[in-house]
Image (cartoon, rainbow, N blue to C red):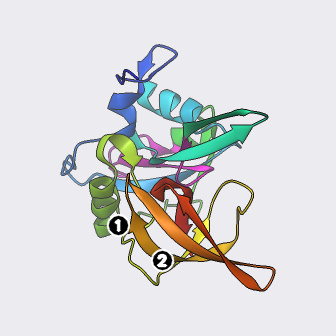
Amino acid sequence: MQRGPVIFGKVNLANVAAPALGAEFGSARWFVAATQPAKEWLALTQLERQGFRSFCPRFRKPWRHARRTGVRLAPLFPGYVFVSFDPGEAPWRSINGTLGVRRLLGSALQPQAVPAGFMAQLQARCPGGVLDTLVDELAPGRRVRILTGPFADRVAVIERLAAGDRVRLLLEVMGGAARLELAPNQLAPE
């Protein structure tokens, strides 16, 4: 499978979705914009065209339909994107009228900035704008939630790390314990 920049329309999303660490300049800060349902990429494209830096962290979400399975990139925070600007210099009110954006979070007078430490940690965990795993540490005994498959939304306990980048889980089913192996990207913290 060949990996390269993802092109959405005429915009290279590799440049939009993954700002460089420490790329803050002046007094620019990060803010959160609520998007219209499933319009994160439209909002990113339009914000870039207006000259705003934006970030939408994604994760690899397994999917299954009929007999086909695969993995797609899904927003880590569905319905939200991060936008960086200096509120004293940038025409930030235009963000509220951007295609795909519902509004900036905050009051009508001033948007609410995201803590700088949070954005630095989030960007550090998302190289290329993609979060590799939702669970920080895969340790035996830790409780995790299964994201996909017939046991989706069930809580299981990690028994051990298996070969081939798999995780062996113990799942309580009908009064007994069942063992199953899943990929780490199919698990989330409880």
Outermost residue to the top: 10
- On the image, the x and y values in percent for residue 65 come to 75, 36
Q: How many marks?
A: 2
Name the quadrant containing residue 91.
Answer: top left
**Rendered location of residue 139, percent (x, y):** 38, 77
Crowding at mark 2 (Cα within 10 Å: few <14, some 14-19, many 20+): many
Q: Can you say which quadrant of the picture contains the C terminus?
A: bottom right
Amino acid type for the residue under numbered disc 1? Phe
Q: Quadrant of the N terminus?
A: top left
Instruction: Report the magenta residues as a range.
Output: 73-93
Res 52 visible? no
Residue 77 versus residue 159 in the image, above or below: above
User: What label sits on residue 118 in the rendered view?
Assistant: 1
Q: Secondary structure at mark 1?
A: helix
> In the image, is 87 to the left or to the right of 95?
left
Q: Is residue 26 visible?
A: yes
Question: Is residue 75 on the magenta stretch?
Answer: yes
Q: Is residue 74 magenta?
A: yes
Q: Earlier in the sequence, mark 2 or mark 1?
A: 1
Residue type indicated by callout 2: Glu
Q: CA distance from mark 2 to mark 1?
A: 31 Å
SS at mark 2 in the image: strand
Residue holding disc 2: 159
Asked if 161 appears above or below 55 in the picture, the reply is: below
Q: Residue at x 43, y 24 (%)?
A: 6
